Image (cartoon, rainbow, N blue to C red):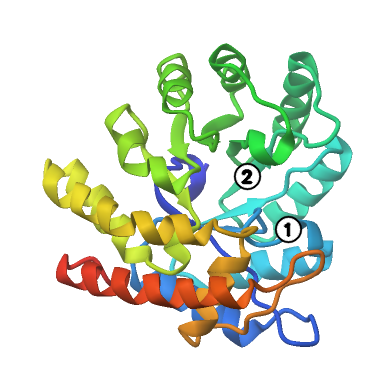
Amino acid sequence: MGLGSRISGVYTALVTPFTQDGAIDWPAFDRLLEFQARAEVDGIVISGTTGEAPTLTVDEKISLFRRARTALPRNIAVMAGTGGNCTKQSIELSKLAQDAGVDSLLIVTPPYNKPSLEGLQAHYGALGQNLRLPLCLYHVPSRTGQRLTAEELSLLCALPQIKAVKEASGDLYLFSKARKASDAVYLSGDDFTFLASLAVGGQGVISVVTNVFPRAFVVLQRSFQGGHLTAATAIHDALLSFTEALFSESSPGPTKAVLSHMGLIENCLRLPLVPVQSQTMQRLKEVYQSTQSRLKELGALS
């Protein structure tokens, strides 16, 4: 296994930029990749929830995977979101992503059909048997409608193909208990819990906030690992109001609104998602400016 065999650190769940006519905005995508590389993030997730994966075609996903892997330096990992609620289709897409050169795969617990534990074990087992890349299990009950216990997560992580878990329940007790019971790397999938998750053995984050402030989480994790807890907490506190604002409407609407305000992308989403309301946009601009000022004081801007 290569770069993705150790999945840890700060990963950005990247948005997919679109033009007004609904096509992928490739120059904007390149700008986003460059912005992330300057911040020295550890990885990028393409075609996740924040990337509006359900609205992307297979050809678009593969093109995004290839472009990201080609454009980014080798020390920044590319994780491809290839999970779904059909095992056969997930395997097919994962093989294409593997051929496109990605380093690891983000596999959500199948939404809508909500398989049993035995079904989940068979699902992830089939993926692992057909692929050579490490898998990151994505546990996000708010999106899938299925909440696993710590015991169930530990049983799934016993599969040799699963090297990491993006745990996005927001429940630190579950995170801590599941992490303790497994050899897999646990990543926070919830920006609010990133700092706290490090304190209970977490080894990174897959973040929405880092679309806008990637350097902040990089500095936060380095500060924590270096024993500078006051500095890490100051960054956490500085980001709280902004993080809350980013989830005031369906994600990634608020994130795209801020990125458009920054001049990086157009404020375009694919239906059924639409741009945020005008009052939300105004609030986002205000909290972005205040957060940016505070992070600059803390030395946590790109």
Viewer-side residue, 85 vs 254: 254
Chain-order first, disc 1 or disc 2: 1
**Residue 172 position in % (x across, y down):** 42, 28
Viewer can see residue 302: no
* 30 relative to 214, above or below: below
Report the side of 94 relative to 233 (left or right).
right
Name the secondary structure under disc 1. helix
Q: Residue at x 88, y 39 (%)?
A: 88
- Separation of marks 1 and 2 at Cα, in angstroms: 12 Å
Which of the 4 image quarters holds residue 150? top right
Task: Please tell me which residue is depicted at 48% across the width and 44% down the height of the picture.
Answer: 190
Q: Which residue is mark 1?
A: 53
Residue at horizontal 44%, vertical 17%?
177
Q: Is residue 49 left or right of residue 171?
A: right
| Nearest-to-viewer mark from 1 and 2 | 1
Nearest the viewer among 298 and 181 is 298
Q: Is residue 287 visible?
A: yes
Q: Residue 291: percent from the left, percent from the top?
A: 31, 68
Specify the amino acid type for callout 1: Ala
